[in-house]
Image: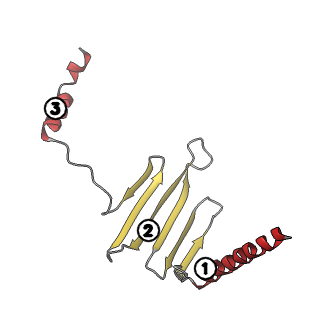
Amino acid sequence: MSTRRGTKPAMNTLILTFFALAAAAVAAPLDQQPPVPIVNQFLDGPNPDGSYSYGFEAGNGIKVQEQGQLENAGTPEEAESVQGSYSYPSEDGNLITLTYVAGKDGFQPQGAHLPQAPPIPEAILKALEWIAAHPEEDNL
């Protein structure tokens, strides 16, 4: 019986610790944001010809819109063509906007916030011009 008496205080401590942790978890503030309302939305499709369009605007400034259609329907070259855009306010208050097209040539995004390739150096441009002007020397 001495072992039972030895485990009872340990069990009480365990139970009290559990309830203390549970009370602390319930009392802790939640860092959850309230839900963002959708203030406008639309959906058209999918239509029998494969076209569709949709979009929405959220209460936090996010806007999305997209349209798509089938090109060369019923042929081996059939492909979906899509164009759209989305925008959202950045943390510093600027509006970030991205427009895109996607289809047989891949996804092509455009936006002022996207990185731009540096200009081609002048020496390389001159070399490319010279190569284009002298195609006969390609067969050496």
Q: Which residue is mark 3?
A: 127
Q: Is residue 123 above or below residue 63?
A: above
Which mark sits nearer the N-terminus, 3 or 2?
2
Circle 1 residues within 10 Å: few <14, some 14–19, many ≥20: few
Residue 86, numbered circle: 2
The residue mark sitting in front, 3 or 1, is: 1
Residue 6 visible to an observer of this rendering? yes
Residue 38 visible to an observer of this rendering? no
Q: Which residue is mark 1?
A: 25
- Relative side of 137 to 93, left or right: left
Amino acid identity at mark 3:
Ala
Amino acid identity at mark 1:
Ala
Alpha carbon distance from label 3 to label 2 = 40 Å
- Residue 95 position, x and y percent, is 34, 74
Figure quadrant of residue 23 = bottom right
The residue mark sitting in front, 1 or 2, is: 1
Helix, strand or loop at label 1? It is helix
Q: Residue at x 20, y 19 (%)?
A: 137
Given residues 3 and 109, the one toward you in this image is: 3
- Residue 63 position, x and y percent, is 46, 74
Which mark sits nearer the N-terminus, 3 or 1?
1
Circle 2 residues within 10 Å: few <14, some 14–19, many ≥20: some
The answer to whether marks 3 and 2 mark residues whose Cβ atoms lie closer than 8 Å is: no
As drawn, the residue found furthest toward the right would be 1
- Relative side of 116 to 3, left or right: left
Alpha carbon distance from label 3 to label 1 = 69 Å
